Image: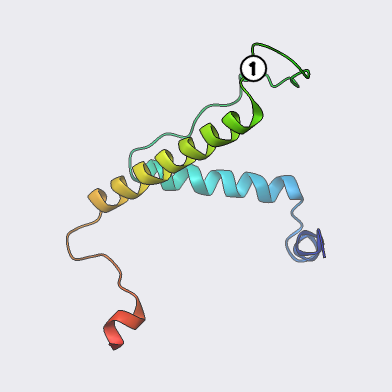
């Protein structure tokens, strides 16, 4: 059911949806900070809807693909920095690999 998890959580923790979102953002900031990356500043951005037929805006499919490519680059950079920050041999292996 949509929203049920947050409603149940609010009963136990007293947190609102905005509180949970802020917790997730802070967790990501800390994770990125551990490997030397910074969280993009979005406080100064102004988002406005694009009018149909606007010639100054790329097509929707190009915007979606650009966003996917950007997220893929960010994930690759995070993984690279995490591997560089961990000591050699400290990488965790799957339980399936050690059992086999």
Q: Residue at x 33, y 38 (%)?
A: 36
Q: Nearer the viewer, residue 8 or 50?
A: 50
- Residue 93 lies, with reference to residue 71, above or below; the image says below
Q: Nearer the viewer, residue 78 or 8?
A: 78
SS class, disc 1: loop
User: Circle 1 is placed at which residue position?
Assistant: 57
**Residue at the left extreme?**
88
Q: Quadrant where the N terminus lies?
A: bottom right
- Residue 44 lies, with reference to residue 78, above or below; the image says above
Position in image of residue 64 (x %, y %): 59, 35
**Residue at the bottom extreme?**
99
Q: Quadrant where the C terminus lies?
A: bottom left
Q: Residue at x 47, y 37 (%)?
A: 69
Left or right: 26, with 78 as reference point: right
- Residue 96 lies, with reference to residue 48, above or below; the image says below
Q: How is the image coloured?
A: rainbow
Position in image of residue 77 (x %, y %): 35, 42
The image quarter containing residue 18 is top right
Q: Residue at x 33, y 44 (%)?
A: 35
Q: Residue at x 53, y 27 (%)?
A: 41
Q: Residues within 10 Å of mark 1 (few under 14, many from 20)?
A: few
């Amino acid at each position: 059911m949509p929203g049920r998890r947050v409603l149940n959580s609010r009963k136990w923790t007293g947190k609102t949806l905005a509180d949970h979102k802020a917790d997730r953002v802070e967790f990501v900031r800390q994770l990125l900070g551990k490997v030397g990356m910074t969280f993009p500043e979005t406080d100064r951005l102004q988002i406005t809807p694009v009018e149909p037929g606007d010639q100054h805006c790329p097509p929707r499919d190009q915007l979606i693909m650009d966003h996917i490519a950007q997220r893929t680059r960010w994930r690759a950079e995070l993984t690279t920095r995490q591997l560089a920050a961990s000591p050699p041999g400290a990488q965790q292996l799957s339980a399936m690999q050690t059992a086999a």
